[in-house]
Amino acid sequence: MITRKVVTMALAASMAVGLSPAFAQQGAGSIAGKATDEAKKPFDRYTIQLRDAASGQVTSTETLNPQGQFEFRNVEMARRYLVELVQNNPGTRQGKVLCTEGPFTLSAANPSKTNVVIECGRKQASQWLLAAGAGTAAAIALATRSASQ
């Protein structure tokens, strides 16, 4: 009976003391920047999407402010995110992703990325990820083919 009480108290103490710092370290960060090089006034015709690079899911969406800037707060740490500029003009390519920047990863050491500049002139990050995946697949195919010969 005493063993059960000791174990119960030890678990309660570890939950109260041990897990709280772990949750505090996880925290949340922010990703912010501007899209003034690509978006045209009025900026409220554009939104910025924050996409989880691993799952492909959009985790948050923000409309550009009147100065063409954006900020995502409470961004979960230790995940890779893509930042996408989306055109929302009624009747013309509504919802079309124009540009992608990233991926960006936040951590306890670097909880924010505040200087994201969306530039469409560069290859989109998603294209780079696809090219990297295709290169990896080709390398595996060649290695498998060479090993079988």
Image (cartoon, rainbow, N blue to C red):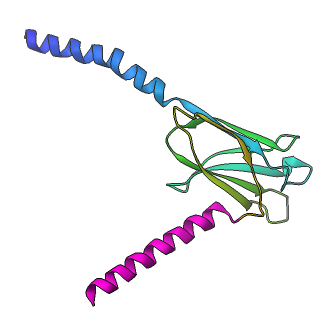
Magenta residue check for 139: yes
Q: Quadrant of residue 53?
A: bottom right
Which SS type dominates the magenta stretch?
helix
Which corner quadrant of the image does residue 105 belong to?
top right
Q: Hey, which quadrant is residue 64 in on the image?
A: top right
Horizontal side, residue 104 vs residue 140: left or right: right
* Magenta residue span: 123-149
The quarter of the image holding the N terminus is top left
**Where does the C terminus fall, quadrant-wise?**
bottom left
Q: Residue furthest right?
A: 41
Q: Position of residue 66 (x, y in %)?
A: 88, 40
**In the image, is residue 75 above or below residue 82?**
above
Farthest residue, direction bottom = 149
Residue extending furthest toward the top: 2
Task: Identify which residue is drawn at 78% across, 61% down.
Answer: 94
Q: Is residue 107 above or below residue 38?
A: above
Q: Nearer the viewer, residue 45 or 111?
A: 111
Q: Name the residue: 92% across, 50% down.
A: 41
Q: With 50 as the anchor, is 117 left or right in this view? A: right
Numbered marks: total:
0
